[in-house]
Image (spheres, rainbow, N blue to C red):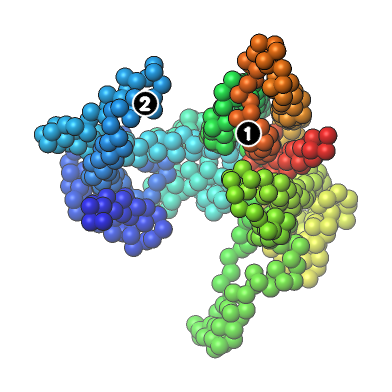
Amino acid sequence: MIVFVPLVVAVAACVALALPRVSTRADLLATRVALSFFGEYVAEHGRRQRERDLLRAAHVGGTHRVYAARTILYSAVFGVAGSVIGVYLAGGILTALDVGEAALVDALPGSLSFLAAVARLTEVGLLELFVLLLISSATVGSALAVGTYYGRWAVLGQRATARAAEIDATLPRTVAFVYALSRSGMAFPRVMDTLAENEAVYGEAATELSVAVREMNAFGTDVLTALQHTARRTPSEDLSEFAENLASVLGTGQSLSTFLEGQYERYQEEAEAKQQRYLELLSTFAEAYVTTLVAGPLFFITILVVIGLVLDDTLPLLRVVVYLGVPLATFGFVVYVDSITQGIGGTESVTRSDPPDSTGETQLPDGGSVADRWAASRERLDAYDRLETVREWVESPVEKVVDSPRSVFAVAVPLGVVGTVVAVHPITWGAPTAVAAQVETAVVTASALVLTAYALVYEVKKRRIRRIESAIPDFLDRLASVNEAGTSVVSSLRRVAGSDLEALTADVRRVRVDMDWGADATSALHRLDGRVASPMTSRAVVLVTNAMHASGDIAPVLRIAADEARATWALRRERRQVMLTYLIVIYVSFLVFLGVIAALSVSFIPAIEEATAGAGGTSTEVGGGLGGIAGGLGEIDTFAYEQVFFHAAAIQALCSGIVAGQLGEGSVADGAKHAAILLILTLVAFAVMGSV
């Protein structure tokens, strides 16, 4: 076993490089080692400007010197480890070839017998063997070292590209926020500070501009210089242009509100144009998926089955296509579509806005605090708060499950496993196909039930948020109308709470109840945001509460927020309507796939079996007849082919469902319901075929 020690050390060194991702101490140690060995080299010879720009565009924390030094360290470790692995790889190949040339000639077809000459590699001398191992070691080591070095910088490029897409997608709502607060009378520096405080709500564009805010606050940079730095740093061309134009307007003293209004209208128009391009792109992806990953595998499976049943056994190749080809191709397709469409039309994550800052301590005139006198009580309260999550689950489990659909898996998956074990117990061990036949139906059924449970909870939450968001523009418009009549913000909220706002009615009335019990309007609205947990609601609440601090006349701000919410809602509705056609196409293509599989199982295979049986009885009289075509069928495991058909249909159902959710509604999670439906259709179809 000592011969494998270098290999184990090499693999362990590669694995150790992953520790900095999970351990702060390992991260610091890697940084210290990298700077110790390569820090001075990077400072003297590194391509600092280009690489620094890439680091800033990717929004990576840390200095260029640290990142570049660690990149060289990783490359060196992988290079050395790759050299060791290359030696063992060459040795393994030589060992595998040590079967003799004659044995390879017998094993290979006649047309490929020339490949048996490769076995002569095991007969080389010591010098030739050394050269061979040296070449293998240098090749693998160099490939890993160079790939690691350029790969780390390429990853930064991909992150910068992804950030650019996210910035472009969130820039319209960020400009609307800045414009609305500027209309409310708030000073521009305070507008930027407010935007930085709410970057989690307004997305990547706000995060990029918040860097300029921190530059102004921490280093005293003037706003024009900070915006110019943002224009040079950002990977988004749209934000770069906006920052440069904004700096020009501020520098020349032009009307800021007029400029922001023009930018706001421009980005709204561009959002509609981008939506159209995005829908066209999605339609292309849908057609490509149906053609290449539904019709293509179906055609390939059909050809392989015909050849396998009539001429020669193709079951191994068929299994490769079904169990590896289709899932891996679908995974690659999903990842590619996600990378191309990232930030344009995808579903938004739910972001809760934080309530106003509160330390929980009351300052006393003598400079002490209540916390000093009641330390023991506060410790008990802290312990009580640490159990808050458990208490919430015990008090309202249904509400918590709806709020977190993924928690369904914590219950559904164990139940599915237990149910599968109970359904198939006891298992008769034997050939792999026989064992799979005992568990396959139970596994697919359990998978369908788990996906159904998750999809139900996910859809309940999604549809609830969708109904609430559809009422937000109306709520903001009514609030603006009442405020324009001269009513204060608090009175406007009370009056609007008495009207019918559809799905938002109950939550707005709770805002009035909160204010009746002494809460200020800001706190009441933040509680509304916490209950609804909707991105659109978060943006509206942040905008309204900050506008209230600047002026009592917030009607213009409310109009802008209502227009932005209405435009966002209209684009989402248009997407759902357009993509409904392609959802139907994916469903129809899967049904065609299922129909062809059913035809092969119910008609083709029995026909071949009957033809073979007839040929076996009459072959001597007919002179070969059908026996020449299907004479070898008796050696083919037709049951195994039928089993692969069922597995192919189940895998295709899962893959088609995921793609349908991603293309049709913007998220893989939306594909759970489609996958569950298609799996149920598969179970029903094969149950009917089994009874035929």
Q: Is residue 211 left or right of residue 80?
A: right
- For disc 2, the marked residue is 106
Q: Label 1, secondary structure: give it.
A: loop
Residue 637 has which mark?
1
Q: Is residue 649 left or right of residue 34?
A: right
Q: Is residue 666 above or below residue 288?
A: below
Residue 216 % position (x, y): 42, 49
N-terminal-most mark, 2 or 1? 2
Residue 359 % position (x, y): 56, 72
Q: Is residue 404 above or below residue 377?
A: above
CA distance separating discs 2 and 1: 26 Å
Residue 682 % position (x, y): 75, 38
Name the residue type under label 2. Asp
Q: Is residue 556 above or below residue 329?
A: below
**Which is more toward the observer, 153 or 64?**
153
- Residue 113 visible here: yes
Q: Is residue 490 above or below residue 86?
A: below
Name the residue type under label 1. Asp
- Residue 262 visible here: no
**Which is more toward the observer, 348 or 650?**
650
Q: Residue at x 39, y 28 (%)?
A: 107
Q: Nearer the viewer, mark 2 or mark 1?
A: 2
**Which is more toward the observer, 63 or 562?**
63
> Residue 658's quadrant in the figure?
top right
Q: Residue at x 71, y 65 (%)?
A: 520
The residue lying furthest to the left in this view is 127
The residue lying furthest to the front in this view is 620
Mark 1 Cα-neighbour bin, 10 Å: few <14, some 14–19, many ≥20 = few
